[in-house]
Amino acid sequence: MSTMTFAGATAGRILTQLRHDHRTVALMVLLPSLLLVLLRYVFNDERAFSAAAPALLAVFPFAIMFIVTSITTLRERTTATLERLMTLPIGKFDLLLGYALAFGLVAVVQVLVAAAISLTWLGLEISGSVWLLLLIAVLDALLGTALGLLASAFARTEFQAVQFMPAVVMPQVLLCGLFAPREAMTPVLEWLSAVMPLSYAVDALTTVTRTAEVDGTLLRNLAIVAGCVVLALVLGAATLRRRTP
Amino acid sequence: MDNYAVVAEGLRVRRGSREVLHDVGFAVPRGSITGLLGPSGCGKTTLLRCVVGVQVVAAGRVTVLGEPAGSRGLRNRIGYATQNPAVYADLTVRESLRYFAAILRAPKGDVDRVIEEVGLGSHTDHVIGELSGGQLSRASLAVALLGRPELLVLDEPTVGLDPVLREELWDLFNRLAGRGVTLIVSSHVMDEAARCQRLLLMRDGDILADDTPDALRARTDTADLEQAFLRLVREQGAVA
C-alpha cells in the first residue's frame, strides 16, 4: 500500500527532525508531567487532585500536541517544502497520516510518563483499568494533533497559528466539565459542550477513574473521540491544496 | 507536439485583482536547456509554478510531457527546485534526501548519486540549517535530481554561488541535457543567458522573446544579450 509507505516515510522524517532537537523532545515528554506536579502541590490535597487530574491528563497533552502540530505544519507550508511535496507522488492524506503517526508516538511517551508520575508519586487513584486510562489519553493527544493539522490550514502566519490554540483549545477546556458539571450548564453551553470532542474524552476519563465497569457510554465516548480524529484528518487533507494562488 | 517537453498557450494568472501573467505562450523543446530570464518580480516563479502544476491558473493550457500540467502521472517525471531552498533545515543532507527518495520510490544508490552530482559529498552528514547559502541551494537542487526526472524546473538555482560552483553546475546541466533531460532554468542575471540553448525573456508578465541566443542577437543587432533585452523592451514600448 502506497499510503502506508508514504505515511511511514513521513513519520520517520518527522521523528528524525525531532531527534535533532533535544530541547523540544524534553519539553514534549515532560511538560504535561511537570504541570500535573505543579497542580498537585497547588491543591496540596490528594483527594482534590484525584478529582481534577484525570481530566487534565487529557487536557495537557491535547493542548500541547495541538500547538506543536499546528506550528510544525505551518513551517512546512512557509518553507516551500509543502509546495515541493505537492509536486511529488505523495497523497495529501498520506502526509497528514504521517504527521499523526509521528506525533501519536510522541504522545504515547508523553502520556506514559505523565500517568506513571500521577499514579505513583502524586497519589492519583483510579478504579478502572490503567490501560484504558492510557488509551483515552493517547486518543486525546491524537485529537490535539489532528485538530492542529486542520487548524494550521487556516493560518497564514505563526502569529495566527499560535492564537488558534486559545481559540480552538480553550473553549473546549472550559466546557469539557472540568470547571463545572456539563449537566449544570445553561442549555446553549451544554449544547456547545456536546459538539466539542474534548468533552467526550474527559467524560471517558472520569468514568475510568470512578468505576472499573466498561459500559456502552464509555465505548460510545471513545468511538466519538476516535471518529473526530479521523474526521479532522480527512478534513485537513481536503483543505490542503496542490494548487495555490 | 512530441518534440516539445512543455507547451503553454494563452496562459493567464491572476493574483487578487492584478493579472501577473498576461496571455503567455511558449514551447520548450525536449532535451534542451531553456533559460527563463527577466527582472525580479516579472512573473518567472509564477510561470514555473504553472509548469509544475501548483499554480491556480485563470485561463489557458500548459501541456507537460504530453499531459496537462499537474497530472498525477507527471509527479515522478518532473524535478522541481523552488527559489527558497525547499529542504528540512533540521535534517542532515542525507536524511533529507532519503525522505524525498522514499516518496519518489527512487532506486537505492540514488541518494549517493545526487549528492555526488551537486558536489556535496563532504557535507553528507551535516545538518542542512548549518550549511552556507550556496550549499543550501545545492542540497535543494539534489532533491530535484532524485529519480532521474525527464524535466527539471529550476528556479534561480545558481543565485549566490561563486563562479567556480556556477561553472560546475552548468557542466552538470549540460551533461543532463546530453542525456536527454529537458531543463528550464530561471535567472535574473543576463550573463547566464548565453549558456542556454533557448531563451524566454520575460518582463511584467509578458514573454518578450522565445528564441535561441544567436537569433536574438541577430534580431536586435547586438553582440550582447543584456543589450538585446533592453532593445526588445524599447521596441515593445514603441509598439504600445
Image (cartoon, rainbow, N blue to C red):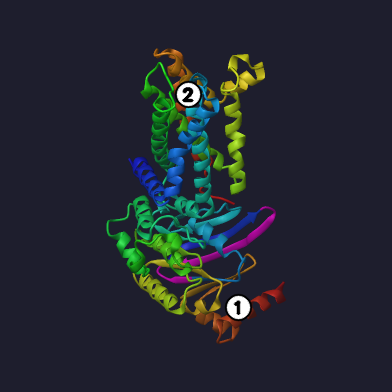
Q: Residues within 10 Å of mark 2 (few under 14, many from 20)?
A: many
| Magenta residue span | B16-34
Could you tell me which residue is drawn at 36 percent across and 24 percent down? A131
Nearer to us in this view, B143 or B216: B143
Residue B7, percent from left and from top:
50, 62
Q: Nearer the viewer, residue A245 or A227?
A: A227
Element assignment for label 2: helix
Q: Which mark is residue A54?
A: 2
Is the residue under label 1 in contact with that under label 2 (CB below 8 Å)? no
Q: Which residue is mark 1?
A: B229
Q: Nearer the viewer, residue A5 or A215?
A: A215
Q: Amino acid at mark 2?
A: Pro
Please name the predominant secondary structure of the magenta segment in the image: strand
Question: Extreme left residue here?
Answer: B108
> Within the magenta stretch, is there residue B107?
no
Residue B29 covered by magenta stretch = yes
Local secondary structure at mark 1: helix
Residue at 65 percent across and 67 percent down: it is B204
